[in-house]
Amino acid sequence: MNRDILDISDGKLYGNNDMVKISCHDCAGCSSCCQGMGDSIWLDPHDVSQLTKNLGKTMEELLAKEVELHVEDGLILPNLKMQGEGDGHCSFLDEQGRCSIHSFRPGYCRLFPLGRNYEDEKLTYFVLKDACPAPNKSKVKIMKWLNVPNIKAYEKFLVEWHGITKRLRGYYEEHMEEEAVIKAINMQFLQIFYLTPYVEEDFYQEFEIRMKEIEKLLARI
Ligand code: SF4
Ligand code: SF4
């Protein structure tokens, strides 16, 4: 376990079958993790496939309002955009302070207040220290908390996604001075994983095809 995680967690790692004390009783009027989050709610391709399919919007349309792009270690990634006064709030937060897209909300929203740890191609979870202020939390199985259909395929996707983004970050770090190449890869990366609509019923199969495309691209550089 790396130091960063030890600093922000209780030091324990969990599998999706484990019970953790994080259940906040349906948030009970709190919406604190939907406000003032800056660019921290990153969206992966699974999130974008869910948002575009369920909202009937293209990624370009989402980028006009609810989503924005940010750069992380040279890699361009989308995140939920905070809107409105002060530090802002997510545009999917309704007037009653509830999530208007609860059934297809992004992975980071499902996860909170958990974090993900990747080691040797294995995904585990940790509890973010003091992240959720709800009192009297009860225990819940991580799998139930995430409430994602086909958790096995979802976690496999997350591990592969972590692997490819880590690889790209590593490449960018070593080739920092090659700005034009990095820009060209980023454009392709966005096109392949985010801008090209997800049309198949099985997201995971479609993702595998796109992984092959990026592998081909990386083999050429
Ligand atoms: S901070 Fe905790 S209680 Fe508040 S909205 Fe987020 S998960 Fe729910
Ligand atoms: S998508 Fe829903 S849960 Fe996630 S930040 Fe927005 S309102 Fe909150």
Image (spheres, rainbow, N blue to C red):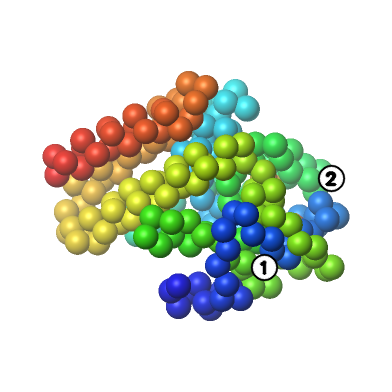
**Amino acid under disc 1:** Ala
Residue pointed to by mark 2: 96
**Amino acid under disc 2:** Gln
Q: Residues within 10 Å of mark 2 (few under 14, many from 20)?
A: few
Q: Residues within 10 Å of mark 1 (few under 14, many from 20)?
A: some
Q: Residue placed at 27% from the left, 32% from the top?
A: 213
Residue pointed to by mark 1: 131
Position in image of residue 149 (x %, y %): 61, 36
> Dividing the picture into quarters, in which one does residue 105 lie?
top right
Q: Residue placed at 28% from the left, 52% from the top?
A: 168
Q: In the figure, is residue 193 to the left or right of 37?
A: left
Q: In this rendering, is residue 76 above or below 7?
A: above
> Dividing the picture into quarters, in which one does residue 150 lie?
top right
What is the quadrant of the C terminus in the image? Answer: top left
Note whether ligand 1 is within 8 Å of mark 1: yes
Position in image of residue 211 (x %, y %): 32, 36
Single out the mark in the foreground, 2 or 1. Answer: 1
Q: Residue placed at 45% from the left, 44% from the top?
A: 156
Instruction: Compare residues 218 and 10 and report the one nearer the observer.
Output: 10
* Extreme residue toward the left, this view: 220
Whole-angstrom CA distance, mark 2 to mark 1, is 22 Å
Instruction: Compare residues 186 and 107 and report the one nearer the observer.
Output: 107
Residue 189 visible in image: yes
Instruction: Give the number of marks.
Output: 2
> Dividing the picture into quarters, in which one does residue 206 lie?
top left
Q: In the figure, is residue 176 to the left or right of 56?
A: left
What is the quadrant of the N terminus in the image? Answer: bottom left
Q: In this rendering, is residue 45 above or below 164?
A: above
Position in image of residue 58 (x %, y %): 51, 26
